[in-house]
Amino acid sequence: MKTIAISTARKSLDARVEGLFGRARFFILADPNTLEWEAIDNLANISGNQLIGIMTAQNLVRRNIQTVMTGKCGSKAFAELKAAGVQVVLDTKGTVRQALERFKRGEVTPATGPNVSEVR
């Protein structure tokens, strides 16, 4: 199963994609082919310091995520994900379900670098 993590503010496939990777309240972990999913809580990380992106990335890497879809991702979190072999798709818009459908149709391109230098 290919697992994708999508940043969101709610535990639902119909929730909007959250704009900031490290500040996302939840991540939906989903298989784009079956739409089987689970939500994981990111609250412990979003109340942290400037290492929130790195801690969030490490948490997803431990769950064997292959791809992350989010709005914006800072340089430290992006580097952490790339070092673990995780593809990062940035500027993701719409709902989690729409993002999964675009991924399934091959309409997304993995980023080659972060789209913000640092998120505070």
Image (cartoon, grey):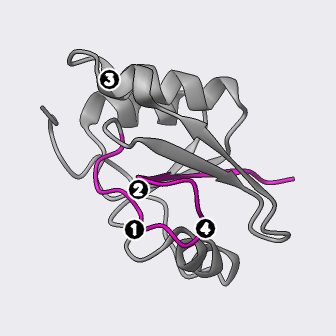
In this picture, is 88 found above or below 89? Answer: above
Mark 1 to mark 2 CA distance (whole Å): 5 Å
Residue 70 numbered tag: 2
Residue 2 part of the magenta segment? yes
Residue shown at 17% from the left, 46% from the top: 116
Mark 1 to mark 4 CA distance (whole Å): 14 Å
Foreground mark, 2 or 4, reads 4
**Segment tinted magenta in the rendering:** 1-21
6 displayed left or right of 52: right
Mark 3 to mark 4 CA distance (whole Å): 24 Å
Q: Position of residue 60 (x, y in %)?
A: 59, 32
Q: Which residue is mark 4?
A: 13
Residue 18 part of the magenta segment? yes
Residue 80 in sight here:
no
Q: Amino acid at mark 2?
A: Thr
Which of marks 3 and 2 precedes in the sequence? Answer: 3
Q: Please tell me which residue lies in front, 37 or 115.
A: 37
Residue 33's image quarter?
bottom right
Which of marks 4 and 3 precedes in the sequence? Answer: 4
Q: Say which element carries label 2.
A: loop
Q: Which residue is mark 3?
A: 52
Q: Say which element carries label 1.
A: loop
Q: Which residue is mark 1?
A: 92
Which of marks 4 and 2 precedes in the sequence? Answer: 4
Discs 1, 2 touching: Cβ within 8 Å: yes
Q: Position of residue 47 (x, y in %)?
A: 29, 22
User: How many discs appear?
Assistant: 4
Q: Amino acid at mark 1?
A: Thr
Query: Which quadrant of the figure contains the C terminus?
Result: top left
Please tell me whether the stretch drawn in magenta is mainly helix, strand or loop. loop
Mark 3 to mark 1 CA distance (whole Å): 20 Å
Mark 2 to mark 3 CA distance (whole Å): 15 Å
